[in-house]
Image: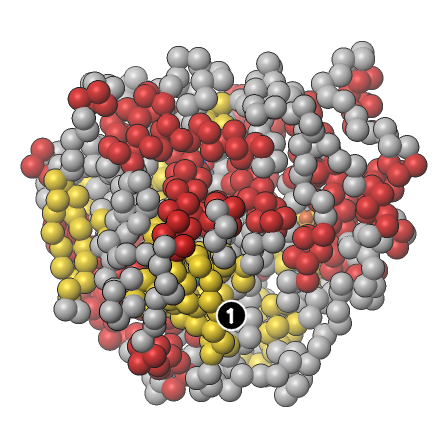
Amino acid sequence: MWAPQQEKESVEVNDRSYDERVCDVLIIGAGGAGLRAAIESHDRGAKTLVVCKSLLGKAHTVMAEGGIAAALGNVDPKDSWEVHFSDTIVEGQHLSNWRIVEIFAKEAIERVYELERYGAVFDRTPAGKISQRPFGAHTYRRLCNIGDRTGLELIRTLQDQVVARGVPFMDEVMTTCLFRDPKTGRAAGALGIDIKTGKLLLFRARAIIIATGGSGRVYQVTSNSYESTGDGIGMAYRAGAELMDMEMIQFHPTGMIYPPGVRGMLVTEAVRGEGGILTNSEGERFMSKYDPKRMELSARDVVARSIYTEIMAGRGSKGGGVYLDISHKGADHIKKKLPSMYDQFLAFADIDITKDKMEVAPTVHYQMGGIRVDPETAESSVKGLYAAGEVASGLHGANRLGGNSLSDILVFGKRAGDAAAKSATAVDLPSVDSKEVEKEISRVLSPFSSTGSANPFHIKEEIASNMWAHVGIVRNAVDLEAGLVEIERLRKDAKGLKAVGPRAYNQSWTDSLQVLDMLLICEAMIRSALERKESRGAHTRSDFPAKDPKWLVNIITVQEDGKMVRRTVPVSTPPQELQRLIKEDD
Amino acid sequence: METHASAQPDQRKTIRLRILRGTGERTSSPHYDTFEVPREEGMVVLNAVHYIQSHLDPSLSIRWNCKAGRCGSCSAEINGRPQLMCKTRVDSIEGEITIEPMQAFPRLKDLVTDVTANWKVAATIPPFTPKANAGDIYTFYQADVDRSREFRRCIECFLCMDVCHVIREHEADYMGPRWVVKAASLDMHPMDGLNRSKFMKDAGGLGYCNITKCCQEICPEHIVITDDAIIPEKERVVDRHYDPILWVYRRLKGGATAGETK
Ligand SMILES: Cc1cc2nc3c(=O)[nH]c(=O)nc-3n(C[C@H](O)[C@H](O)[C@H](O)COP(=O)(O)OP(=O)(O)OC[C@H]3O[C@@H](n4cnc5c(N)ncnc54)[C@H](O)[C@@H]3O)c2cc1C
Ligand code: SF4
Ligand code: SF4
Ligand code: FES
């Protein structure tokens, strides 16, 4: 099993050759969405291949903490899919697609039980059922959890299922571009880099699922993984797919602020779910001013804005955040319910949260927008191209509820896998234009022949600090315009991006390619944010502070004739029987 | 050796890192590069390495993802001890910091090793197989959860594999500590109907482990690998009903049992 070092052949930096891989369904991404899609597609008999940029089992999903939302009603029997539906629509500020939310709320329940049958071990109620904890803006206790390690359990369980089924996968492969059949326009393939060796790969498939997760890494202060650079959004956009709601970025209310090296690291909402209290420098429990009814468990956008307001008003903590305290719950309870948080603060900040307060401030957490998809099949506006998970849009509207993402990735991962497998059996293998492949290879290899000396790690930092400074929690036209100017400047710098060293595991190369898509995504985010002249959910404009019914629209971003264009489409109203379910809080 | 540093660095303001470089390719000979990085309060080794990529040498290769000790990507040997770079505080180390890749696995480039052989092993372990009477919605209790939880914390950093002398010597027949933990996590699953101990002994080469306990000393998730996973798996072959945690639980609860032993 364990072979000693073997001498490998090296790949010349300008080597244009590639290996070809053909399958029915190509799945890009192995987070919860990609893995669940793989199981479905494989079980439906499609020849499936999964590729992912990080190692198998290390996708961003692994970090999810608090839980997975599904209306099992195990703790609060009054809960039902109908209430989950209403909570999601209301907290999404009515920007969600009602049909996507309906499917989600109904199917999340079965997906959780199915995950348990796959081998996940959830915390229990005294009666031996899956236990459920409270979370912000969920009417009932609804988050099924595994301590504060829900994502780890979810991804390991799905990974085991994929491995046991023998579904082929290639980890540490980064795709850079999607190809479409020149005649039919159907998605036909992708170019990839085998990161380990630096070799190029051409994937050809009858259907492609993008499950590449979010793009939180375009921000300086973020809870997101290294890999969350939005590649899938960039690739889909360049292939002509429609994006939606790109202005909607979730700032999680509580990220660590100290020490500087871990700034942005998530402090799970479960701390507040378990009774954590937020105070300002005056010792005031300030949430009573902003949402006296739900207090710390208000919606994320509300809590994040409240913290921001307190800090801006000079009532911040010493480190520039606010205080979060759970110590009153006692050491036993904390170590049992929040073991990772206990470890995290002890290891990184020398703080014992069973005794002392934490200092927290908002951190970029989740992207509500992304690839626009059909509710039933998760197909994008490009035929044969599907999207599921954080990379897709339509479920969370203007604000995502905690726990809704993990159920999202299971529900729509499965649906995408199902639909892609079905459509794959109905079509011939689409063709890929070899001229386009050659063009993409030239683009991909260009950082090696670059005469510039731009460092991609450095440019990434500049992108991130620009977005943090200009496209933050509270926005205005002046800042957004300045952000755009900066993106244009960085785009010029990026022309000089330089890859140094050999092809194998060369991050100066792979990161250079990511930078280009990050710039695209930032532009889409800023232009959409400029367009939406109102404040709604996570999108707050100081120059347009009110919510405006005129803006009950989704902003679509698409590439036309090489240009980024936008149009708005009204949010469709749910049918009467669903409309009746929606219970406005105020 | 290459030094990217000024002549007289102040150790209170900067940290000196020695990093083993090389690709494992025919043309590459491994060597150490030394870098001087500004010290920041509370910084971890991964922060220092990022500084190098961004300011001193963009050709340095590292594997990382979560930067929060959750994904198990950033495993390396820091001053000889297998650790996660993102969880190792710089201020916990006196003087110079030497970082080398895990030695048990073939090197890809610099600090990155090829761990893919693990997936082949993973595929051979009998997967979760629910008991015949499990039903569609499971009923089991928190005590059952608690006794399997320890093994389910594994983040697959493979540091235990790196420290294990059996694996280091490339003993082809031993699956290694991570995979014994996996088998234990399945065997301890309250609804699982299999017993993998015989399999682990026959196909997993469990006999090669001579209980040195090096693996459990370095596990970043504090899994007590040898005592809680390896030894019980070894002993379960002899007595199929040996379950130390349930046994303790029964004693504490005066005979109440939440699940059944297999
Ligand atoms: C700290 C933290 C805690 C969270 N806690 C919760 C929670 O408690 N509950 C909840 O519901 N949600 C939570 N979330 C959000 C949730 O974890 C994510 O939204 C969700 O896991 C996204 O899953 P995904 O499958 O869509 O994508 P990801 O898990 O992000 O996976 C993306 C995959 O795509 C691959 N990929 C990316 N680009 C490429 C490329 N170019 N080529 C090939 N592969 C590529 C990656 O390698 C990876 O395999 C949390 C998020 C964070 C950061
Ligand atoms: S206890 Fe066994 S598995 Fe662990 S390091 Fe020693 S020999 Fe290896
Ligand atoms: S058992 Fe511990 S050391 Fe081994 S892979 Fe798992 S987390 Fe890492
Ligand atoms: S980067 Fe994930 S464990 Fe270190």
Task: Name which residue lies at 50% across and 37% down.
Answer: A65
Task: Name which residue lies at 72% across and 52% down.
Answer: B124
- Image coordinates for residue B35, horizontal then vertical, percent: 56, 74
Write down the quadrant of residue A249 in the picture.
top left
Q: Is mark 1 within 8 Å of ligand 1?
A: no
Task: Name which residue lies at 71% across and 56% down.
Answer: B121
- Image coordinates for residue A107, horizontal then vertical, percent: 40, 31
- Image coordinates for residue A215, horizontal then vertical, percent: 35, 54
* Tally of numbered discs: 1
Residue A484 in view, yes or no? no
Q: Quarter of the image containing the N terminus of chain B? A: bottom right
The residue lying toward the viewer, choosing from B236 and A574, is: A574
Residue at disc 1, secondary structure: loop
The residue lying toward the viewer, choosing from A307 and A185, is: A185
The residue lying toward the viewer, choosing from B219 and A210, is: A210
Q: Outermost residue toward the right?
A: B238
Label 1 neighbour load within 10 Å: few <14, some 14-19, many 20+: many
Q: Classify residue A426 as left or right of residue A556.
A: right
Name the chain letter of the residue that bears numbered label 1. Answer: A
- The amino acid pointed to by label 1 is Ile
Task: Name which residue lies at 43% across and 84% down.
Answer: A16
Residue A492 in view, yes or no? yes
B47 above or below A365? below
Q: Outermost residue toward the left?
A: A550
Write down the quadrant of residue A331 in the picture.
top right
Q: Quarter of the image containing the C terminus of chain B? A: top right
Q: How is the image coloured?
A: secondary structure
Q: Classify residue B179 as left or right of residue A64.
A: right
Q: Classify residue B231 as left or right of residue B123.
A: right
- Image coordinates for residue B120, horizontal then vertical, percent: 68, 58
Residue identified by numbered label 1 = A195
